[in-house]
Image (cartoon, grey):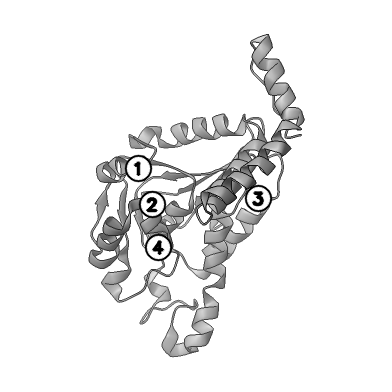
């Protein structure tokens, strides 16, 4: 059986790599890939031995968006053809796609995008959902929906203003122009840009660094950072006090302080 999303787990270092695996179609999204992606995200999210996740693409693209065969006039049987299945069924058809976006965004573990080429349309939005983004120097980004008369249905209207600000978000959505990797880095979208041959190694080093940290503190930090975007400062501080109370009573905090005083590297267990 073909694996539309492959998974590699580094048990020693505590991270997993999910690779979108339709290189002949630039890792474009069809129903089979989305279903496999959602399933693998659920597996890594619930595996306590995995503390960080890398998402990348096979071949020369990260993800080129929805497979055009799934759209009007195509030969696919996916849920993106309003004229064939009706508008209400079409709306329901986005459930699986949104499971993928939310599976990345709401996962309690840090998710690192290793962007190895084109990230277009829904592929751009998948990158936006990740916590940390590292790109090769051949990466390019586009909110391509406008070119085929579509709305950014994978979260773009929510992600872009928060990441880029209103004006740049509007430019990306209304023009459908490519954003080159240099501009993406200068705007803070990318944490790092490396040559193609160093991308996976760089992402793995970041995953190792994150996975070596205290799982409880990192999980709470990610959750609070995500939720804090819709909170006022006072509410955020109240939630921070609750989260800090949890970490102050954790064994990882004791281990961290002992390691600091003993001048050694801490070994966090997630307790």
- Rounded to the nearest angstrom, the CA distance separating label 4 from label 1 is 17 Å
Disc 4 from disc 2: Cα separation: 10 Å
Which quadrant would residue 104 be assigned to in this image? bottom right
Q: Which residue is mark 3?
A: 45
The residue sitting at 33% across, 69% down in the picture is 145
Which disc number belongs to residue 163?
A: 2
Q: Earlier in the sequence, mark 4 or mark 1?
A: 4
Circle 2: element type: helix
User: Between disc 2 and disc 1, whose residue precedes?
Assistant: 2
Mark 2 and mark 1 residues within 8 Å of each other at the beta carbon: yes
Disc on the earlier residue, 3 or 2: 3
Reading the image, the residue beneath label 4 is: 156
Residue occupying the point 56% across, 69% down: 96
Label 4 vs 3, first from the N-terminus: 3
Badge nearest the viewer, 4 or 2:
2
Residues under numbered marks 4 and 2 in contact, where contact means CB atoms less than 8 Å apart: no
Q: Quadrant of residue 76?
A: bottom left
- Badge 1 crowding class, 10 Å Cα cut-off, few under 14, some 14 to 19, many 20 or more, is few
- Please tell me whether mark 3 sits on a helix, a strand or a loop: helix
Image: 234 above or below 266: below
Residue 191 seen from this side? yes
Q: Nearer the viewer, mark 1 or mark 3?
A: 1
Q: Residue at x 50, y 30 (%)?
A: 205
- Residue 175, position in %: x, y? 23, 65
**CB atoms of marks 4 and 1 within 8 Å:** no
Binning the other alpha carbons within 10 Å of mark 2 as few (below 14), some (14 to 19) or many (20 upward) gives: some
| Residue at mark 1 | 188
The answer to which of marks 1 and 3 sits earlier in the sequence is: 3
- In front of the other: 227 or 206: 227
Badge nearest the viewer, 4 or 3: 4
């Amino acid at each position: 059986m073909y694996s539309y999303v492959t998974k590699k787990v580094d048990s020693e270092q505590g991270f997993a790599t999910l690779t979108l695996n339709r290189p002949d179609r630039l890792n474009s999204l069809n129903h089979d890939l989305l279903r496999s992606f959602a399933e693998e995200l659920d597996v890594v999210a619930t595996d306590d031995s995995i503390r960080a996740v890398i998402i990348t693409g096979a071949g020369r693209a990260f993800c080129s968006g929805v497979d055009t065969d799934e759209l009007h006039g195509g030969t696919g049987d996916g849920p993106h053809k309003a004229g064939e299945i009706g508008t209400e069924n079409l709306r329901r058809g986005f459930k699986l796609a949104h499971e993928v976006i939310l599976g990345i965004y709401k996962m309690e573990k840090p998710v690192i995008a290793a962007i190895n080429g084109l990230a277009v349309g829904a592929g751009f939005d998948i990158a936006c959902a990740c916590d940390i983004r590292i790109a090769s120097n051949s990466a390019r980004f586009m909110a391509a929906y406008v070119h085929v008369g579509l709305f950014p249905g994978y979260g773009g209207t929510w992600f872009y203003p928060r990441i880029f600000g209103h004006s740049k978000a509007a430019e990306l959505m209304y023009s459908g122009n490519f954003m080159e990797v240099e501009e993406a880095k200068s705007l803070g979208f990318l944490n790092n840009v490396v040559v193609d041959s160093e991308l996976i190694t760089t992402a793995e080093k970041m995953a190792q660094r994150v996975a070596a940290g205290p799982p409880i503190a990192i999980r709470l930090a990610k959750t609070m950072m995500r939720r804090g975007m819709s909170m006022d400062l006072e509410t955020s501080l109240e939630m921070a006090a609750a989260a800090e109370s949890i970490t102050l009573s954790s064994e990882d905090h004791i281990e961290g302080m002992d390691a600091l005083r003993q001048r050694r590297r801490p070994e966090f267990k997630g307790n």
